[in-house]
Image (cartoon, rainbow, N blue to C red):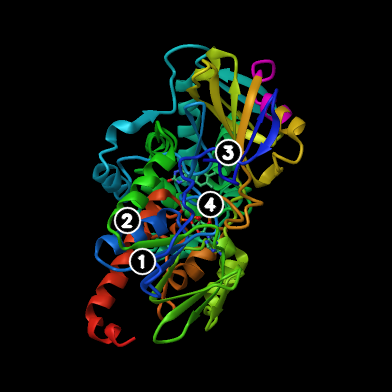
Amino acid sequence: MTSRDGWSWTKSGGLKQGVPSIGVIQPATIISSTEVFYDVIIVGAGYTGLTAARDASVSGLKVLLLEARDRIGGRSWSSNINGYSFEMGGTWVSWEQPHVWREISRYQMRNDLENSFDFSRGVNHFQLNAAHGTTFMSHEEEDALLVSGLHKFVNVDGAMGRKIIPFPHDTFHNPEARQHDNLSAQDRLNQIAATLSPNERAALEGFMVLCSGSTMSKMSFLEFLHWWALCGYNYQGCIERLITYKFKGGQSSFAIRFFQEALATGNLSYAFNTPIQAIQDKKNMVEATSKSGRKFQAARLISTIPLNVLNTIAFDPPLDPVRKAAADIGHVNQCIKVHAEVTDKDMRSWTGVTYPRNQLFYAIGDGTTPAGNTHIVAFGGDHFHFHPEENVDTTLQTFQNLAPGKLNIQRLVFHNWSKDEFAKGAWFFSPPNLLSTSLDALRERHGNILLASSDWAVGWRSFIDGAIEEGTRAALTVKNELAKSAPQRANL
Ligand code: FAD
């Protein structure tokens, strides 16, 4: 099935909107004609919504899942082209991510993972194109460069960040962390700039903006420190947890398991292609109204709508001012992720950073396609933002600039997250001051409405793991509440 989402380009076919994905759901709607009142409505079929829908329907609740798109997965979905998966959004997972790993175990998918990197053959080097010139180095030298830059960057407390964030799943466990939330990554860089070599600085900045999809000035230093803590306070941990292990069959092969398990209970109704525009808490029930004016009612509603589009929904009563202000500010991630299939097999073991002069600035060899070509994934961000579908020649050129003369591109595949009306950005990355002022408020319930999202998870916030953490929390809350109020519900 082909989704409306995503883009692909080939020399022979040109640019096309919409790519095939096993995440597209057909039939698009299954709503039982007898069920007019649900235990819980879940808005959004990303990992937060899928986890909540699965857990709630498995526990016996009558669930209605409403999704604006034609597919599951939200910001994590894969396209399957000629038997090969291209990840359009969320990709890498790890056994160090507790909620993700619980699900990978549940669906017995341990052996469905593979390693993005393969340094066993080919060019086997790192290419750093910085403002001051180009350097080729071994991957060991690449690691050493980043280790030394990162250690200077994170060492605000003489303990590599461990004193500031001693509990990675609780950013503000040490109240002192709040004092560091006004710092941008640029502020921190300025503090240590004199100690960095030009290459260290270019590699460090490339890595930072890769993490945030933003700019050094707009991204929060504390949020990076939180990632660093989650990654075991070391660079190797970052590489292994953030950018190494992915599903051979793509994220949609994982997401579909949640959906199928929920469906098999017989308790799940759903409607795709159903954008919601209003959510009203009527005290004894919640009502969701779609853009086409259709109304759906339930005892509770779980909204998984991401932060950057939260204010597009008319909540009644209105959301509290702190939460509304946080949604107005939004997260700062405008990552551009573009895949290319290139003919040079030796580039499989290549990695590169071209910062700050190129729109796409960070890339790695990510696989070998069935045609025997090398698959390279590249990232851009807000520091030099562009929309890859607007001018494909520019996109091809910026991709080729990553390794001049080495990238004979046969195919491009991407999703424009910045223009996506149901995300308006990629994974959550906080600007300075947002977490300390708003994280608690974002996690609050709103009457009979629970707001759950990876964007305000406590642990792997902004990751698939955080989405599963949040979906679990929301479904359990609803299950426990409705179990207590069972006699009243019969009278609704
Ligand atoms: P979403 O996936 O955004 O789900 C929310 C759902 O709500 C969507 O399906 C949306 O369509 C729907 N929706 C929105 N508005 C409405 C409306 N009005 N009516 C009805 N439905 C609506 N994470 C990792 O762990 N590893 C990675 O490698 C990684 N890389 C990433 C790369 C990119 C380019 C991106 C974009 C994300 C990446 N992430 C990664 C982050 C991860 O994808 C997200 O954190 C996670 O998928 C968010 O899940 P969610 O369910 O909370 O939100």
Q: What residue appears at the point 55 percent right and 72 percent down from the top-left corner?
A: 294
| Residue nearest the viewer, comparing 142 with 210 | 210
Gap in angstroms between the C-alphas marked 2 and 4: 18 Å
Q: Are marks 2 and 4 in contact (CB under 8 Å)?
A: no
Which one is earlier in the sequence, the residue at label 1 or at label 2?
1
Find the distance from the CA under tag 3 to the CA under tag 2.
25 Å
Relative to residue 75, is residue 41 drawn left or right? left
Amino acid on which disc 1 is placed: Val
Q: CA distance from mark 4 to mark 1?
A: 19 Å
- Label 2: few (<14), some (14–19) or many (≥20) C-alpha neighbours in 10 Å: many
Question: Residue 1 location, x and y as percent?
Answer: 51, 40
**39 lies above or below 22:** below
Q: Secondary structure at mark 3?
A: loop
Which mark, by number, is residue 262?
Answer: 2
Residue located beneath label 4 in the image: 70
Task: Tell me the element at label 1.
Answer: strand
Under mark 2, the amino acid is: Ala
Query: Could you tell me what secondary structure mostly forms the magenta stretch?
Result: loop
Find the magenta span and give its range: 397-408
Q: Residues within 10 Å of mark 4 (few under 14, many from 20)?
A: many
Q: Nearer the viewer, residue 383 or 344?
A: 344
Which label is found at residue 19?
Answer: 3
- Asked if the residues shown at circle 1 and circle 2 are in contact, with their CB atoms under 8 angstroms apart, the answer is yes
Can you give x and y, in whole percent of width and height, for residue 58 in the image? 26, 60
Label 1 sits on residue = 63
Q: Any atom of ligand 1 within 8 Å of the CB at mark 4? A: no
Label 2 within 8 A of ligand 1 by Cβ: no
Residue found 69% across the figure and 19% down from its top = 404
Q: Position of residue 468 (x, y in %)?
A: 36, 54
| Mark 3–mark 4 CB contact (< 8 Å) | no
Residue 161 visible in rendering: no
